[in-house]
Image (cartoon, rainbow, N blue to C red):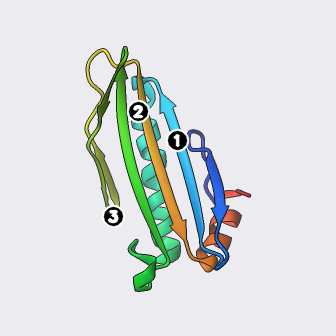
Amino acid sequence: MMQLHYLDFDFSEDELGHACWDALACVPPERWEALLAEAQALLAWCEQQGGPAGDMDAGFSWDFDLQATAEKGEQTTPIAITWAAPVLQATGPQDGSTRCCLGLSISTTPALTNAFKEGLHLE
């Protein structure tokens, strides 16, 4: 079981039982590394539960999308972010950034959806 401190997921499900979990977390730059650690641990947990991520139409049990940005005043700049199991790599925020945002979407098959709900205490 994992307790989440930064990522707060919205849940949607299609008629086949495939689920999509969407989260957006925005933190000050000094919390960026903690947010990345939480996302890395969650992705590693998903892989432990469902095997490697990949196109669910090709038979994988889960997939994900990551996006990150840094805000500096009115300017928003993309942050390069990748996950190659088991490591999440991202560039740091720019000097003077006031906020860093991480968007994470995880899609799951019905079997992994149930494990996700139970393991993370999500509904």
Say what secondary structure mark 3 lies in: loop
Left or right: residue 109 versus residue 81 is right
Please report the residue visible at 52 percent of the width from the left and 66 percent of the height from the top: 107
Say which mark, if any, is on residue 49. none
Left or right: residue 6 versus residue 65 is right
Say what secondary structure mark 2 lies in: helix
What quarter of the picture does the N terminus occupy? bottom right
What quarter of the picture does the C terminus occupy? bottom right
| Outermost residue, bottom side | 59
Residue wearing tag 3: 85
Task: Name the amino acid, label 1.
Answer: Leu
Please report the residue visible at 58 percent of the width from the left and 57 percent of the height from the top: 21
Say what secondary structure mark 1 lies in: strand
Residue wearing tag 1: 24
4 shown above or below 69: below
Could you classify mark 1 by the number of other residues whose Cα lies within 10 Å: few (under 14), some (14-19), or many (20 or more)? some
Residue wearing tag 2: 32
Q: Position of residue 31 (x, y in %)?
A: 45, 29
Task: Name the amino acid, label 3.
Answer: Ala
Task: Name the amino acid, label 2.
Answer: Trp
